[in-house]
Amino acid sequence: MKTRVIQNEPSQPRLEENGLRGERAASWWRLGRVLVFVGPLLWAALILFHPMPEGDSAYEGMKNQVDAFLFVHVGQLILTPFLFLAVWRLLQGLPSVAAMMSRAALVVWAVFFSAYDSIQGIATGLLTDHANGLAGQEQAAVAGAIDFLVKDTPLAGNISAFWVIASAAWLVVAIAAAVALHKAGAGKTVVVALCISTVFATHVATAAIGLVALSLAGVARERQRRKLMLGAPVVTSPADAPALGTPA
């Protein structure tokens, strides 16, 4: 008697499921790559044009650079949510205490940096632009207000409560994220790049180094995530689930 061996071929629904999963993984990877790469790099490019006012008073230092001053600070305010989303994406799927600390600090940073940027950057820029159209005592009065906002107010001046809280919050964001991703097995590139991103807390031209490092960490993490998504086996029954594990 001849025995016929029947080889089971993958069903059409199974093939379609594999293809759909691959398309979804690729779409999420592209979106994540845009968030973690473009946002920080745009900010890094923007901050290189940040004027560094010099002079006997804040007004004297800014009056000839007011357009660039406003452009940079309005741009930073626009890019703040994109930077927020980049870090949030970087930490996606991590339930550790370090990851939760980083997310909480990220919220604090976004609030206090936005307040600092609005007062120290946009408000002083607008007052400077207004003062440029005045003369005599009127101009001197507005110039005095600008000096107060930039140098004297303890709430949002150059060295002030908003600045200190925003800077400290970013240090927690970067360091806690590095710890969380290290524990998740993200690799040295991601962890070291996140440590370098602490430089962003300086809020001056050198902060661009930190932003480029943050982008590098994000791109490296997205590549790891894509490999996990595309390489993981498909669950076809409840019995298969325990064999899959949970990627860190």
Image (cartoon, helix red, strand yellow):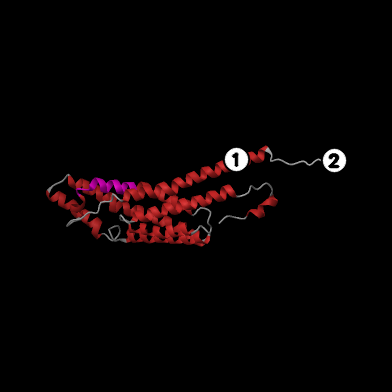
Q: Nearer the viewer, residue 5 or 206?
A: 5
Read off the magenta span: 63-75
Q: Nearer the viewer, residue 96 or 140?
A: 96
Distance from the alpha carbon under mark 1 to that under mark 2: 38 Å
Q: Nearer the viewer, residue 168 or 224?
A: 224
Amino acid type, residue under disc 1 in the picture: Gly
Disc 2 designates what residue?
Answer: 2
Of the 4 image quadrants, the one containing the C terminus is bottom right
Amino acid type, residue under disc 2 in the picture: Lys
Disc 1 designates what residue?
Answer: 19
Let me know if residue 80 appears in the view: no
Horizontal side of 172 relative to 68 (left or right) equals: right
Work out whether mark 1 precedes mark 2 in sequence or the reverse, and give the earlier one: 2
Residue 119: x %, y % from top left: 29, 52
- Tell me where residue 12 sits by quadrant: top right
Q: Residue at x 57, y 55 (%)?
A: 247
Badge nearest the viewer, 1 or 2 = 2
Q: SS class of the residue under badge 1?
A: helix
242 in relation to 29, above or below: below
Tell whether position 181 is magenta. Answer: no
Tell whether position 65 is magenta. Answer: yes
Residue 167: x %, y % from top left: 36, 60
Residue 128: x %, y % from top left: 21, 49
Residue 207: x %, y % from top left: 34, 56
Let me know if residue 206 appears in the view: yes
